[in-house]
Image: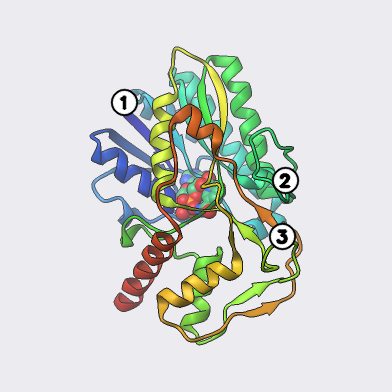
Amino acid sequence: MRILVTGGAGYIGAHVVRLLRSRGDHVVIVDDLETGNAGRVPDVRIERLDLSEPSSIAILAALFAEERIDAVLHFAARKQVLESVLRPAWYFQQNVAGLANLLLAMEEASVRRLVFSSSASVYGSVDGDAITEEAETRPLNPYGETKLVGEQLVRDAARAFGLSAISLRYFNVAGTGWPELADHAVLNLVPMVFERIDNGLPPLIFGDDYPTADGTCVRDYVHVLDLAEAHLAAVERTDAGEPGHRVFNVGTGEGTSVRAMVQAILTVSGSELEAEVAPRRPGDSGIVVASPAKIARELDWRASRGLDEIVRSAWDAHVSRSAVA
Ligand SMILES: NC(=O)c1ccc[n+]([C@@H]2O[C@H](COP(=O)([O-])OP(=O)(O)OC[C@H]3O[C@@H](n4cnc5c(N)ncnc54)[C@H](O)[C@@H]3O)[C@@H](O)[C@H]2O)c1
C-alpha cells in the first residue's frame, strides 16, 4: 500500500511508520516537526508542513497525486491537556482546522481511506465498568473536544464524499518498541516518574482516596507497539469501495492503579525511593479502562504486551538517552 502518515515523526506515528515499512509499504510523512523529530524516521520522505495553514490543502493534494497515495494515517495533533485549556482557539485551529484541510485535500485528490488518532479523552468523566464505544462522550477539556469534533467531522466526510474511515480511541499509551523512538516529553505518568527518580525526588501520586482497591486512580496502559499494530489492522479494514466511519477503543481491558504503576517503575529502575501522596488533581476520573471487545471482534486485534514490557522498554530507552546526554 502507499500511505501518507501525518505526524509520522512523532512518538506513535514513528512506530507505525517503522511497522509499515517493515512489511513493504511505501510511506510519505507530513509533519511540521514542532514536537516530532526527523531522526526517528531516517530514509523516509518528510514534507514539512503545518496542516492548519490553508495553503497546505493544495500542497497535500499535489502530494497525494505525485505519490499515488492509497490511504492516510492522521496522527498530527497537539496533545497537551493543560495547554489546550490555556489556548483553546489554537487547539481547535491546530487539531480541527488541520483535519479539515487534510479532508479537503483528500476529497480533491480522491483519496478515500483514513485512520484518525482519537483518544479516550472523548469520554470525559467515567468511572467503573470497562468503557464501550457506546458510552456517553463528554470531554473534560478542549483537547478532548478537538478529538470528538474531529471524529464528527470524519463521520460527516464519510457521508459526503465516500470516505472509508476508522477513528481509534487510544487509552494510556506508553513504552517503546525501539529506544530511539521513545517519548521523552514529560507529560504522562511514566516520564514524570522517571524525572522524579533522576532528581532523587519521591514520585508523586495525586490522590489516594478514590473508590478503587488501593485508593489511587486506575488506568488502562497499552504498549505503543500494540497500538501501532492496531493501526495496521485498521488501515486494512478501510476499503475505498465501502464508505463509512467506525470507532474503536484501543486498550487492554486491564486496569493498573497509579500506585502499582509507580511501584513497577521503581522496581525496574532499582530505586529505593518511596512514592508520596499529593492532593487529587482536578478533572481526574477514578477508573478509566477500555472495553476492547469491539476491536477484537471486528479487527481481530488484541494487545499482547503487558505492564512489565511497557515499563522495561521505557526505562531502557530513558537510561540509554541519559547515557548519551
Ligand atoms: N501519546 C498518547 O498518550 C496519546 C493518547 C491519545 C491520543 N493520542 C493522539 O495520537 C497522536 C500522536 O500522538 P503522539 O503521542 O505521537 O504525539 P507527538 O507530539 O509525538 O506526535 C505528533 C506529531 O504531529 C506533528 N504535528 C502536530 N501538529 C501538526 C500540524 N498542525 N501540522 C503538521 N504536523 C503536526 C508533530 O510535530 C509530531 O511529530 C495525536 O493525534 C494525539 O492526540 C496520543
The correct choice, above or below, for 268 with respect to 38 in the image is below
Residue at the outermost front position: 213
Q: Amino acid at mark 1?
A: Glu
Whether residue 73 is visible here, answered yes or no, is: yes
Residue 2, picture quadrant = top left
* Left or right: where 29 falls relative to 87: left
Secondary structure state at the residue bearing disc 2: loop
- Kind of residue at disc 2: Pro
Quarter of the image with the C terminus is bottom left
Q: Which mark is residue 246?
A: none
Q: Residue at x 52, y 85 (%)?
A: 273
What numbered label is drawn on residue 139? 2
* Mark 3 or mark 1, earlier in chain: 1
* Circle 1 residue: 66
Residue at mark 3: C-beta within 8 A of ligand 1 = no
Query: Which secondary structure, mark 3?
Result: loop
* Mark 3 neighbour density, 10 Å: few (under 14) some (14–19) many (20 or more): some
Give residue 284's mark: 3
Residue positioned 34% across, 53% down in the render: 38
Task: Tell me the element at label 1.
Answer: helix
Pinpoint residue 256: horizontal percent, then vertical percent. Answer: 57, 60
Q: Residue furthest top?
A: 241
Side of 36 relative to 103 (left or right)? left
Viewer-nearest of discs 2 and 1: 2
Front residue of 129/238: it is: 129
Q: Say which of 120 and 36 sits in front.
A: 120
